[in-house]
Image (tube, rainbow, N blue to C red):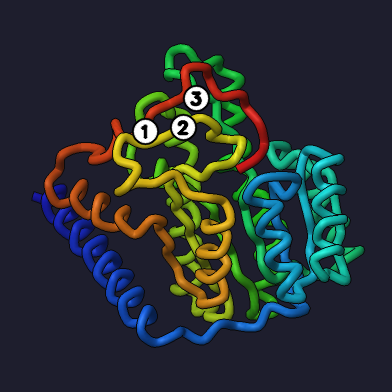
Amino acid sequence: MAPDLNSTKDLFVFLGKSVFSVLEDMVFTLIPKPQKNVAGEIVLITGAGSGLGRLLALKFASLGSVLVLWDINKEGTEETCEMAQAAGATRVYAYTCDCSQREEVYRVADQVKREVGDVSILINNAGIVTGKNFLDCPDELIEKSFDVNFKAHLWTYKAFLPAMIANDHGHLVCISSSAGLTGVNGLADYCASKFAAFGFAEAVFAETVAQKHMGIKTTIVCPLLINTGMFEGCTTKFPSLLPVLEPEYAVRKIVDAILQEKVYLYIPRVLYFLVFLKRILVLGPSFRELYIAPEKAWKPEEVR
């Protein structure tokens, strides 16, 4: 009986979130929602050396934020730094950091605190994908997927959340994925790591609310495929319904969600409905076969 009650409870919680999100979108489509001012806020972006991370940096540069750029690729991070300065940022700090290494995250985080100050907006964006069937994926690549896509979030939260709580001011942003909502063929390790990232971010959000840290905001982002180097060559079976997202569009939606302090952002919006169907009809992953992978396997790379 207990499992049935738990399932019913989970279902109603999800339905409540979905209905709230849809209603919120409908209301604020007609009535613009106030956006917070992030000028002067210290924004740390992981995976900032290319792709989505770079575009996020450029957007926050135009909003007057202080930028802290992390990436394993030193050359890419420095290039993003120069681009951000050209876009109007007056304070940009670039650091080489392998987010999969806990001690390195802590070391560079301490350096940031000394040289820049307390991070007030943390965007965990760095990610890798192997694109191999589970049994074909080497153990070390599976471990790397979890280290970058999930465990890095643990270490960055540990490093920067205490100051946010002390200041009663901060914003935690998790760039998860639609693959963190449902299983996808050929992406078992990636899905597992993104499910973990989503669950972790949601659990910490619940903790901050329960502990009445109302100044700490959370935004969890689940986009479909984004046309960056990470998923180059991928399509969907129904591009009119589930289009591959252009990076500029995805960044605009993500930044708007952060400025509006939305907790959940699924893009495109049809994902809300598909996940709803998955839960209601118990059909298993309702869009597990909608991805079409390129003929060659993806190369692991720390970009989004």
Numbered disc 3: secondary structure: loop
For the question of whether residue 146 can be seen, the reply is no
* Picture coordinates of residue 164, whole percent (x, y): 67, 72
Mark closer to the chain start, 2 or 1: 2
Residue at image point 31% right, 76% down: 26
Q: Quadrant of residue 248?
A: bottom right
Amino acid carrying label 1: it is Tyr
Q: How many marks?
A: 3
Looking at the rendered structure, the secondary structure element under dot 2 is: loop
Q: Earlier in the sequence, mark 3 or mark 1?
A: 3
Where in the figure is residue 191, as x and y percent of width and height?
43, 36
- Give the x, y percent position of residue 13: 25, 64
Marks 2 and 3: in contact by CB < 8 Å?
no
Amino acid carrying mark 2 in the image: Cys
* Residue named by callout 3: 131
Q: Residue furthest left?
A: 1
Residue 240: in sight, yes or no? yes
N-terminal label among 3 and 2: 3
Residue at horizontal 35 percent and vertical 42 percent from the top: 239
Whole-number angstrom distance, CA of label 3 to CA of label 1? 12 Å
Q: Which residue is mark 2?
A: 234
In the depicted view, which residue is nearer to us: 29 or 198? 29
- Front: mark 3 or 1: 1
Query: Are there few (<14), some (14-19), or many (20+) residues within 10 Å of tag 2?
Result: some
Secondary structure of the residue carrying tag 1 is strand
Q: Residue 101, relative to residue 222: is it above or below?
A: above
Asked whether disc 2 touches disc 1, contact meaning CB atoms under 8 Å apart, the reply is: yes
Residue at 85% across, 49% down? 95
Distance of mark 2 from mark 1, alpha carbons? Answer: 7 Å
Q: Amino acid under label 3?
A: Gly
Q: Which mark is residue 291?
A: 1
- How many residues crowd mark 1 within 10 Å: few (<14), some (14–19), many (20+)? many
